[in-house]
Amino acid sequence: MTTPLGEGTRMPVHDEGLTAELSAVGERAVVCRLVGDLDVESLSPAEQVLDDALHARPEVVVVDLAEVGFCDSSGLNLLLRTRVAAQGAGVGLRLAAASAPVRRLLELTGAEAVFELSPSVQAALDGAR
């Protein structure tokens, strides 16, 4: 399915503490790159971009977490809500390249068991083929 974003389109959204960027990769995948802290004070850009990604209805949305320096329970809750919304829309969701703080939060909460985790964005995209 073709996304309305078009190949390589980038739509950065910035708020204090977090930048979120969305890009289409081919016709079947969308990558959401998050940079900064994913916490109660900076959720807005991530929420907006993840919603846009799901509305594009690709086969898979990959959330690049390599540059997330901190993630609190509200950030985890956003990821969990996005997972449920993706399932409801028939869209795959993969978390990629989780930074050490994000990996630790996923491990401590047991949330790693409900997400499809990939060591890199490329590995997540390769799994979509």
Image: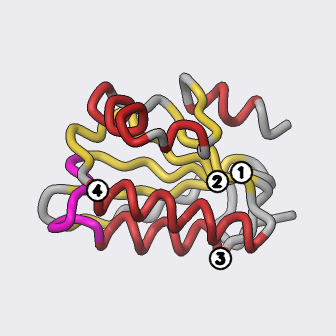
Q: Which of marks 2 and 3 is nearer the N terminus?
A: 3
Q: Residue at x 27, y 32 (%)?
A: 101
Question: In which quadrant is the N terminus drawn?
Answer: bottom right
N-terminal of the two: label 1 or label 3? 1
Disc 1 and disc 3 in contact, CB within 8 angstroms = no
Q: Position of residue 126 (x, y in %)?
A: 75, 29
Q: Name the residue under label 3.
A: 55
Q: How far apart are marks 4 and 3 (CA)?
A: 25 Å
Q: For numbered disc 1, what is the local secondary structure? A: strand
Label 2 belongs to which residue?
A: 61
Mark earlier in primary sequence (2, 1): 1
**In the image, is 64 to the left or to the right of 89?**
left
Q: Position of residue 43 (x, y in %)?
A: 28, 67
For disc 4, the marked residue is 73
- Name the kind of residue labelled 3 in the image: His
Disc number placed over residue 29 in the picture, else none:
1
Q: Which of marks 4 and 3 is nearer the N terminus?
A: 3
Residue 104 drawn at (x, y percent):
33, 30
Decide: is 38 above or below 121. Answer: below
Question: Which amino acid, by three-letter code, is at mark 4?
Answer: Ser
